[in-house]
Image (tube, grey):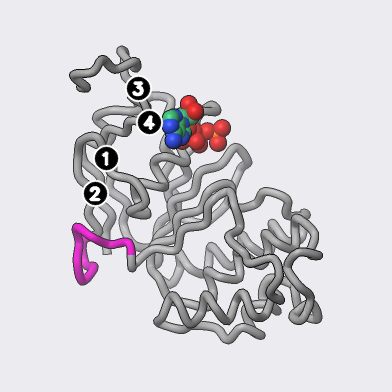
Amino acid sequence: MRLVVADLACRRGVRLLFQGLGFTLEAGRALIVTGPNGTGKSSLLRLLAGLARPEAGTLRLDGAPEPDDFAEETHYLGHLDAHKPSLSAQENLAFWRAMLGRPALTVGAAMEAVGLGGLERLPVAVLSAGQKRRLALARLLVAQRPLWLLDEPTTALDVSAQARFGELARAHVAAGGLIVAATHAPLDFGPSDALDLGAWRPARALLTEEGL
Ligand SMILES: Nc1ncnc2c1ncn2[C@@H]1O[C@H](COP(=O)(O)OP(=O)(O)OP(=O)(O)O)[C@@H](O)[C@H]1O
């Protein structure tokens, strides 16, 4: 499998965030996306997740059943953890496991893997910020999806949870998975490429009504 991005432009409102972006990410590698606040790292992940449309350019996942429409092949972990606060940790994860299809680890095993064993029955509303983030990461483990799109994945995680998540991410990459991660913190996900999105800022960022 291979992620191929060509001549990509992203617009938010009247602002062109980046233009002419191209890269190829091979299976078994991670892409670490950096850049100052507001350069469009989250926006790039949303484009890759199929949650927004590019202003120009193409996104393709070669080797996927539908290379031009590959949202089903991705796990998207945004800034928000996307939990239902009144449901228990276990119920939230069971929901995602059924929703996402292609089941991988059981709910119990995924919770153990992120160090949440014993907290299964607590409503998510009472979990700490780091525990909520751990639960969001457990979602990556309950369904098999080759491309992980991670927005600041280690936010709120303590040192040992960061290390544990690093191990899980490296195992995914070593098994032939792909990761695109936006971050301000150093991340070691194994064999990796780097993308400084700040370098793709267009000279003229403010658009007129005519667009590009
Ligand atoms: N819905 C929207 N309408 C207009 N502008 C938006 C919208 N969403 C985001 N933006 C703008 O797009 C720009 C890029 O935002 P984005 O969140 O992608 O940046 P980022 O590189 O991830 O930033 P950070 O490092 O702060 O997380 C910002 O200037 C933001 O204000």
Which amino acid, mark 2? Leu
- Point out the frontmost of discs 2 and 1: 1
Pointer 3: residues within 10 angstroms few (<14), some, or many (20+)?
few
Query: x and y percent of residue 37 in the render?
Result: 55, 28
Please tell me which residue is depicted at 63% across the width and 67% down the height of the picture: 84
Numbered range of the magenta stretch: 62-71
Question: To which residue does mark 2 refer?
Answer: 59
Mark 2 and mark 1 residues within 8 Å of each other at the beta carbon: yes
Q: Which mark is residue 12?
A: 4
Query: Label 3 belongs to which residue?
Result: 14
Work out whether mark 4 precedes mark 2 in sequence or the reverse, and give the earlier one. Answer: 4
* Distance in Å between CA atoms under marks 3 and 1: 14 Å
Query: Residue at position x 27%, y 40% from top?
Result: 54
Q: Is mark 1 within 8 Å of ligand 1?
A: no
Q: Is residue 88 left or right of residue 138?
A: right
Q: Secondary structure at mark 1?
A: loop
